[in-house]
Image (cartoon, coloured by chain):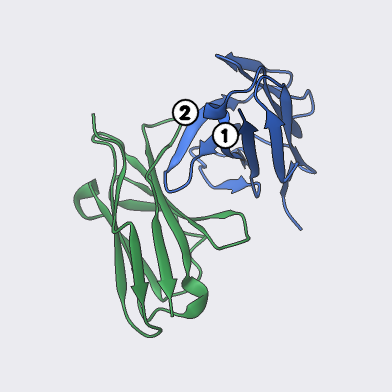
Chain colours: A blue, B green
Amino acid sequence: SQELEQSPQSLIVQEGKNLTINCTSSKTLYGLYWYKQKYGEGLIFLMMLQKGGEEKSHEKITAKLDEKKQQSSLHITASQPSHAGIYLCGARSYNAGNNRKLIWGLGTSLAVNP
Amino acid sequence: EAGVTQFPSHSVIEKGQTVTLRCDPISGHDNLYWYRRVMGKEIKFLLHFVKESKQDESGMPNNRFLAERTGGTYSTLKVQPAELEDSGVYFCASSQPGLGEAFFGQGTRLTVV
């Protein structure tokens, strides 16, 4: 079974609509990373959350990590075609030194129709 | 400033052949990581270099995979001999010390036929 569950797997929205993508684990996460990938390109860093209850925003994207550090959500407000791509959550599953062994969700494919 | 560069972008090889993937990290980044995504599966960690030393190679699938980072600059990942199940996209990433963002390359799509 997946250590990180992302939902939904895919999403099609009309331009201007809001949307939310979720990333859930049964374990405590020590660092939650959100990345975006466009076809044929590398992963582009969006945000990193570390503390329970933490929330960060950048332009129209807001990411939150719940108090138990087992679930994160990514919310896009007033979506635009430029938001289209695959959104991936990655996390450190244990807290040790410079551990960078991230585990990943399968990704959420987002399409935004103009 | 140049980002993380991977070469080649695509490689198609026959089962049993050898392939070497290269990653040039961002200059000054001590941390270098290799990840792999097999079609339909999640991205999996392969290994982590700190400068030229292997910090964690627990994700390497088997001894057909050899990663090196001579001089602590670019890194290579060699697969010898390649098997069908090695097909996937191999990502390289680099970061500065600490737990901040890692910058990813565009990936190498490896197809073993």
Residue B83, above or below B28: below
Q: Which mark is residue A84?
A: 1
Label 2 crowd bin: few (<14), some (14–19), many (20+), radius 10 Å: few
Whether label 1 touches label 2, CB < 8 Å: no
**Which residue: 29% across, 67% down?**
B20
| Place of residue A95 in the rendered image (x, y in percent of width and height, measured from the top left) | 61, 37
Establish if B111 lies above or below B73. below
* Quadrant for the N terminus of chain B in the image: top left
Image quarter for residue A31? Answer: top right
Q: Residues within 10 Å of mark 1 (few under 14, many from 20)?
A: some
Asked if residue B96 lies left or right of residue A29, the reply is: left
Quarter of the figure with residue A80: top right
User: Label 2: which residue?
Assistant: B100
Q: Is residue B79 visible?
A: no
Depth check: give the residue in front, B34 or B13. B13
At which x and y percent is residue A50? 62, 25
Amino acid type at mark 1:
Ala
Residue A34 visible in the current orientation: yes
Q: Residue at x 79, y 28 (%)?
A: A68
Q: Residue furthest front?
A: A114
Query: Which three-letter amino acid code belongs to the residue tagged 2?
Result: Gly
Residue A27 location, x and y as percent?
76, 42
* Residue at left offset 36%, top offset 32%: B96
Give the chain of mark 2. B
